[in-house]
Image (spheres, grey):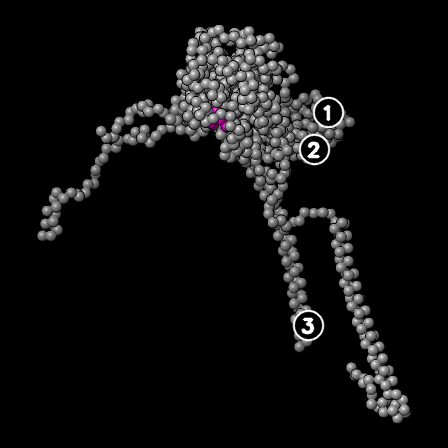
Amino acid sequence: MRTMLYVTTFLGLIGLAFWAYRENYQTQAALDHVADLHGDIADARARLAILKAEWAYLNRPDRLRELSEINFERLGLLPMRPEQFGKVDQVSFPHVPLVVTDAIEVTSANAAAADEELWP
Amino acid sequence: MTRTPLRPLARILQARSNGENPDAIERENLRIRHEQMRDKARVRAEGRLLVIGAMFFCAFVVIGARMGLLSATEPSEPRARATGASIIASRADITDRHGRLLATNMETHSLYAHPQQMIEPLRAAKELKAIFPDLDEERMIKDFTDEKRKFLWVRKKMSPEQMQAVHDIGEPGLLFGPREMRLYPNGAIASHILGGASFGREGVDSAEVVGTAGIEKYFDEELRDPAREGAPLELSIDLTIQAATERVLDSGMRLMNAKGAASVLMDVHTGEILAMASLPDFDPNDRPRPPTNGSPSDSPLFNRAVQGVYELGSAFKILAASQAMELGIVTPETIIDTRPPFRVGGHAIGEFEGHNYGQISVEEVIMNSSNRGTGKIALAIGTERQKDFLRRLGFFDPVPLEMVEAPGGKPLIPQRWTDLSTVTISYGHGLSATPLHLAAAYSAIANGGHLVTPTLLKRKGTSYGDTVLSEEVAANARHMLRRVVKDGTASFGDVPGYHVGGKTGTADKPREKGGGYYKDKTITTFASMFPAEAPKYVLIVTLDEPVETSGPKPRRTAGWTSVPVAAEMIGRIAPLLGLRPEYDMGEVTNVTLARQ
């Protein structure tokens, strides 16, 4: 009985030692991975900064103005003026004539005849 | 353990039979027992002492070993961190109020040479000249072949294409170092506000970027502070409006043949400057050197809006009228006699082109811009009260703007403030200030009498200072300014849809070397606010030496020069600011009633 207890304790000790060893190496690996990720984040930040700078450079007002002047015939862009503001009631809606193509009889003019057809 | 009895019967009986005292046996046994007990207790105590001693020894060994380890090993950052917070060493960006980039950093490379490692110095110099045409080939050959030189800079910064071209030379003595350079993607837009940056201390592997002017220099420490973690500096400037302002001002300056121009657009409630332009300007990416000869005010580096101290002319008149109304001396309807003669300190005060407006109300004095009328109002106010009012409006000190150039805009005030000074200053002569000062003073009229401090940083909510005018007086002053545009000297300033109020100012330029004024050089100013009923923005436009030549005679007054430019500017920027135009009723045409 006592021998049995000693053997189990010893096996338990070996098991725990193995577990601690593995955890230690897993932690080391995770830390290495985090360090790599930090490096990647720094690279991504640097790339993002370049892209932002390029975006700002391509969107600089001078360039946009020149582009709108070059493409005036196609786009017809002009600076915004006060005259371009308006109220809804100033908008003249186009008058669309009402054309009925598929009429349905809903009046009661021929109601008596229809009644006879249905209830002879 | 067997316990020996104190009185063993055998020995007692034997002792009794021998006639001895049996108590002696008991005492003897008791003594032996006590001795045994004492020995046992001592051993146990010694054992305990040993254990405690061993524990203390171990503890001291552990602490000592840890201390020795700590002092002997290299310090290192803990590898595991909870957050990804990292120190960002590069200079913070500058953005406009909507987060659009005004200044940022770019990674680039510098080029340096180790002449002792060069294989073909003559070919390297020739090839470098082909890549960088501005380099001096003779000089490079001299430096590259100099035995004593071990190191020299060739270029501080270059583009990736140039770097590749230099790489393709294949010269081992040409080396690259990483560089972080400041980039202003919008070019010359807002150049005076941003200023510029250059390299401070330089090493092969890095160089510090330091601000050289403008807001870059004012906030140099903050922008370089790693604790910011790269948070951008948000300005009050709106890039779109700044670009539109500069565009209109530039065309206006050309059209009016002016040699310089400045404008300030300010929010009257917060003091935020939305756009501030000064022409001619420069590209902060390639900031020119300060001029070594000639007047510094002719350099493109000179910021006319902040540093340009000018006599601002009749735009000052509304200040005298407002103060007189505040003090209860006059009302807008009070009649002032503006007929000549009006002499102060032996000088006759004249009107523009010798006009005589007769007896007119205070409102008409402002509308017609009468010098004599304003002078009389100023005399009624008195010198001390006038000085006090102007001091409170900030006309005695530089505007505390967040730019290193701001202290340069110190107003020029007369040494001796005579009655004549009081009169001339009331119509804007004899006291020189910057357009920014005028913007701050007009903001007080526009927002109902509260002082605001101009700022270039984004603010939240109103930031009123002291109250200098009552609500009613400010409203009356605004009404007068509206009349100036509707019926007075600034009739070109009317923008359909936006009710603009404002006052013109034309001042003759003083000669640089003293001795009076030029006859044919003026500084024209239009100080305006819109929408006039409840103004949100103040706009100051100043032109330097403008001439309008469409008429038979060249015109140099503000009404013909600054006012049309300002009107065009308001027409362009007010829609961008999100202001709805309001047309007077009756202008709506082609609308029929739906029901009769």
The front one of B315 and B62 is B315
Q: What's drawn in magenta, residue-wise?
A: B445-450
Q: Where the N terminus of chain A falls, by quadrant?
A: bottom right
Residue type at mark 1: give it.
Asp
Q: Which residue is label 2 attached to?
A: B203
Vertical relation: B188 (above or below) B347: below
Q: Residues within 10 Å of mark 3 (few under 14, many from 20)?
A: few
Residue type at mark 2: give it.
Gly
For the stretch drawn in magenta, the main secondary structure is loop
Q: Are marks 1 and 2 in contact (CB under 8 Å)?
A: no
Residue at 55 percent across and 33 percent down: it is B234
Q: How many marks?
A: 3
Which mark is in front, 1 or 2?
2
Give coordinates of residue B228: x percent, y percent: 60, 38
Q: Are marks 3 and 1 in contact (CB under 8 Å)?
A: no
Measure the C-alpha gap from mark 1 to mark 2.
20 Å
The chain identifier of the residue carrying mark 3 reads: A
Q: Which residue is label 1 attached to?
A: B143
Residue B359 figure quarter: top left
The front one of B71 and B151 is B71
Mark toward the start of the polypeptide (1 vs 2): 1
Whether residue B257 can be seen here = no
The front one of B522 and B397 is B397
Vertical relation: B205 (above or below) B5: above
The chain identifier of the residue carrying mark 1 reads: B
Q: Are marks 2 and 3 in contact (CB under 8 Å)?
A: no
